[in-house]
Image (cartoon, rainbow, N blue to C red):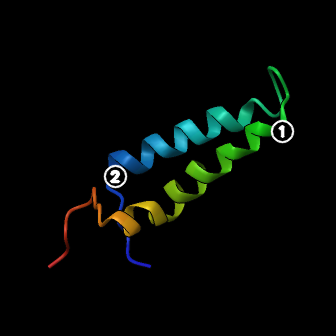
Amino acid sequence: MAINEGTLDRALRVIVGLAILSLAFIGPQTPWAYLGLIPLLTGLVGFCPAYALFGIRTCKLRT
């Protein structure tokens, strides 16, 4: 698994993931909020399977 997410992309994913996940504990408290784990984990790891599938990279290539 090579990193395919840039710094800004990763930061936004973590923020959005935490915001969505917080809805499981505050707000409507719906189980759908656990879908926030997906952007949170991909942001923390730096690898997005959908990006790999479509050949997208938001990070600079290391040479």
The residue tagged with tag 2: helix, strand or loop? helix
- Who is closer to the viewer here, 6 or 48? 48
Residue at the extreme front of the image, as rendered: 54
Q: Which residue type does callout 1 highlight? A: Pro
- Who is closer to the viewer here, 20 or 54? 54
CA–CA distance in space, label 2 to label 1? 29 Å
Residue at the extreme top of the image, as rendered: 27
State the residue position of label 2: 7
Q: For the residues carrying marks 2 and 1, which lies nearer the camera in this image? A: 1
Q: Earlier in the sequence, mark 2 or mark 1?
A: 2
Question: Is residue 29 shown above or below 46?
Answer: above
- Residue drawn at 34 percent across, 45 percent down: 8
- Residue drawn at 67 percent across, 50 percent down: 37
- Viewed as shown, does residue 34 lie left or right of 9? right
- Residue drawn at 49 percent across, 45 percent down: 13
Image x and y of residue 51, in percent: 38, 61
State the residue position of label 1: 31
- Viewed as shown, does residue 55 lie left or right of 26? left
**Can you say which quadrant of the picture contains the C terminus?**
bottom left
- Viewed as shown, does residue 49 lie left or right of 31? left
The residue tagged with tag 1: helix, strand or loop? helix
Image x and y of residue 2, in percent: 38, 76
- Residue drawn at 80 percent across, 20 percent down: 27
Residue 33: quadrant of the picture: top right
Question: Is residue 37 shown above or below 20?
Answer: below
- Residue 48 appears in the figure: no
Q: Which residue type does callout 2 highlight? A: Thr
Q: Residues within 10 Å of mark 2 (few under 14, many from 20)?
A: some
Image x and y of residue 45, in percent: 51, 65
Q: Residues within 10 Å of mark 1 (few under 14, many from 20)?
A: few
